[in-house]
Amino acid sequence: MHWKKLPFKEIKQRVFEALGNNLNYKDEPILGLPATYLDQEQFYFNAPFLKEAPFLSTLISNPNHIGCHTYSKGESYFSGTQAIEVDLLRICAEEIMGAEPDSYDGYVAPGGTEANIQAQWIYRNYFMKEKNAKLSEIGLVFSEDVHYSAFKGCNLLSISPITINITETRQWDLNYLEKQLIKAKSNGIKYLIIHLTMATTMYGSIDVPTPILDIIKTHFKDYFVHVDAAFGGFIYPFTNENSKLNFANPEVSSITIDGHKMLQAPYGTGIFLSRKGLIEYAQTEEASYVQGTDFTLCGSRSGANAVSMWMILMTHGSEGWKYQMQRLIDRTDRICDRLDDLKIPYYRNQYMNIIAMDANYIPIEIAKKYHLVADDFNKPKWWKIVTMMHVEKHVIDDFLIDLQQTNTVFNN
């Protein structure tokens, strides 16, 4: 895991060179495209600061990255910024998620929800095309802590959700998994998509693939494994070098990562990655007016979002990013140490920056003051802290002092 940190001058130069290799709505005779640059009454091309603002310049230029540029060249009008997206995908797939060079396809999606559904869509189509599967024969298996996009995908794609209970340690209940698999087979399920999570939304828990897949293999031979690393993808691989939820694991076929969480990128910066030979099952050949056709749920998408993620990764480099993530872990450790002193029960994976605290020990006024998130706002059992970049030491100190002073449990 090593990509080079670049000085801002070089980052800026490479982005503006990429824009120079794109078609320019302002200066070239473009008659056929149903698109243009951003409205000039609101977004002014000649603002002096834009010379030092490569992302904003890309946003105003408005390149469309429709298609999948690891699979085909796509529309030639925006080849410059498409190349930046391809390099971004290379960093994410090879450097962070352990893929071999040129062994994957992918694109920058509007977010993790689409990326998760993209995986389901691909595997559903594979089973239908290659195995002559009926919709009623395809199931999606996931834990009860899963992100709601799993249910949304099942609803959209008409595949069967198979929910697995979790244990007190936020791991899959393997006995319950076996029972559910037997039940699914009796109900006609023949093909599975296994949805594993690298950092669940509420708890930051990490699914452990080997025991889960060992049981699945005893009941099903046709399955694909998708890893939802929407939250954990830009932190967990940097804090736990022994992660098995990546492409170095031959069982893993696709991965979702979100840039708008840990990477501090704008919304609209999800990433979908899959092994070669899979994304074509989502190809929309009817999109014949698009050079290279389309492989994505969203179709048209902003090239500026890909540029923003690439710029952030280049600004830090791999070592700089690892340092940033370790700082967050250190701050989270500090909170947990104090919670231990105060005897407040909580769940936390040691490699993650999420703490789920027992709601019985958290006064509601504290939860509201610090904008904690509940597992269920109607009847909270857990209140969640997420130690993000903006969470400074003094805020942590204030929270812990308030917690100690207002909860009578600690005064006995």
Image: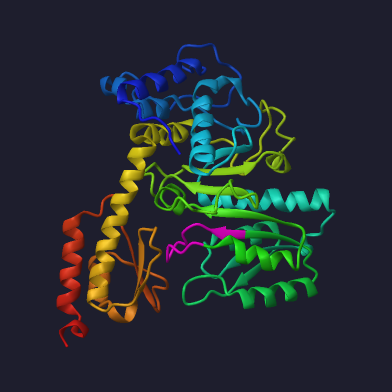
**227 displayed left or right of 288:** left
Indicate whether 346 appears above or below 349.
Answer: below
**58 displayed left or right of 120:** left
| Tag count | 0
Residue 141 visible here:
no
Residue at image coords 27%, 74%: 340
Q: Quadrant of the N terminus?
A: top left
Residue at image coords 25%, 68%: 337
Indicate whether 20 appears above or below 194.
Answer: above
Of residue 235 and residue 380, the one placed in the foreground of this image is: 235
Of residue 220 and residue 203, the one placed in the foreground of this image is: 220
Q: Quadrant of residue 295?
A: top right
Q: Which residues are magenta?
A: 195-206
Residue 327 drawn at (x, y percent): 28, 50
**363 displayed left or right of 246:** left
Residue 256 drawn at (x, y percent): 54, 49
Quick one: which residue is furthest to the front in this view? 242
Color encoding of the figure: rainbow
Residue 174 visible here:
yes
Quick one: which residue is furthest to the right in this view? 132
Residue 116 drawn at (x, y percent): 58, 52
Q: Is residue 49 magenta?
A: no
Residue at image coords 76%, 49%: 126
Q: Quadrant of residue 209?
A: bottom right
Residue at image coords 26%, 72%: 339
Indicate whether 412 appears above or below 67.
Answer: below
Of residue 75 and residue 223, the one placed in the foreground of this image is: 223
* Magenta stretch secondary structure, dominant: loop
Indicate whether 319 appears above or below 135.
Answer: above
Q: Quadrant of residue 298?
A: top right
Residue 249 drawn at (x, y percent): 60, 50
Q: Is residue 200 magenta?
A: yes
